[in-house]
Amino acid sequence: MCDEQSERDISQRAGKGFSPERRDFNKLLAIGSLAAAFPQFTVASDHVVSHDVSITTPDGSADGYFVHPKQGNHPAVLMWPDIKGLRPAFKQMATRLAAQGYAVLVVNPFYRDVSGAALPDSVTFPSNEAWAILREYRSKLTSEAVVRDAQAFFAFMDAQDAVNTQAGGGAMGYCMSGSFVMRAAAAMPERLSAIASFHGGGLATDDDDSPHLTVPHSRAAVLHAIAENDDEKVPQMKVMLRDAYAQADLPATVEVYEGTLHGWCPPDSRAYNETQAERAWSAALSLFKTHLV
């Protein structure tokens, strides 16, 4: 999972058989040069419409970004970011997905503590100060809180004209939020038809509240895209996941992506691996095309 050791791995293992992509996504976005370096994240403005939104939850008001095609109604997809929170890279990812025909809500998971960016401008990531702040935020995202949030987020989306409530819903989770999509699918089996996690941490453990124990309550088809170095640390996780989905008779792809480091999917990550991130993105699109109907 995303922690200090994962960040040390990125620094130590770059160039040793692993290929992080080091282009500065945020800088390119700020200066308007994103299209040249990351053409996959550029979407014509006449294809989609987006809104900064506020969602009422049992625990407060969550800020988010809601984006969808300009015409019609579409399957809803909830996107949870990684531990660095809601930021431009995830808004671009949500916009890219919306252009494929989905109504996408990407949320600030830390709304109980902060609105907008997870860290103040004066705090850099990674650093001890950043980790202290993020760990405190993360501690409030209990399994019960995650389920409450997921229910509120889908209630918000289902009230929007752009959402087809008759179609199955989807959810995407990155890093810490890989487990969130599993808990949401188990809590809302009638609403969630497909979930995808990318370099998710702690998805199957020996703990009594391990996320994989929720699988029997889910009806969702699944993609778990696992980082190679995460698999090296906990090789039993993929086995436990595969066994859980097989026993529940749910369609599931649990794959270790060769040559990847934890955090390899968001384009602003130090571990970004464009080739493998694109392959995982295509796998998620295929999953949604098949099951969000």
Image (cartoon, rainbow, N blue to C red):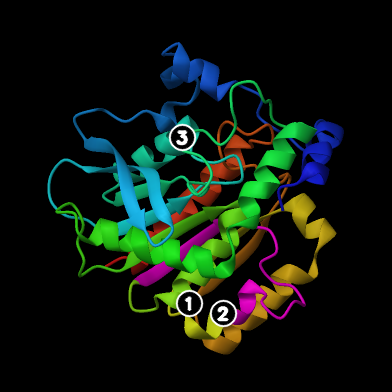
Indicate which disc, 1 or 2, sits on the residue closer to the N terminus. Answer: 1
Question: What residue is pinned by disc 3?
Answer: 116
Above or below: residue 60 compared with residue 46: below
Residue 198 located within the stretch drawn in magenta? yes
Q: For the view shown, which residue lies furthest in the top direction?
A: 31
User: In whole angstroms, how far apart are the C-alphas of marks 1 and 2?
Assistant: 6 Å
Helix, strand or loop under label 1: helix
User: In whole angstroms, how far apart are the C-alphas of marks 3 and 1?
Assistant: 28 Å
Q: Are marks 1 and 2 in contact (CB under 8 Å)?
A: yes
Helix, strand or loop under label 3: loop
Q: State the image quarter where residue 83 is shown.
A: top right
Q: Tell me which amino acid carries mark 2.
A: Thr
Indicate which disc, 2 or 3, sits on the residue closer to the N terminus. Answer: 3
Image spot of residue 178 (x, y percent): 58, 59
Question: What residue is pinned by disc 2?
Answer: 214
**Residue in the picture at 27% in, 56% down:** 157
**How packed is label 1: few (under 14 Cα within 10 Å), some, or many (20 or more)?**
many
Residue 26 located within the stretch drawn in magenta? no
**Residue in the picture at 16% in, 40% down:** 70
Closer to viewer: mark 3 or mark 1: 3
Q: State the image quarter where residue 44 is shown.
A: top left
Examine the rendering and report whether any part of residue 97 can be seen: yes
Residue 136 as seen in the image, left or right of residue 10: left
Magenta-colored span = 192-214
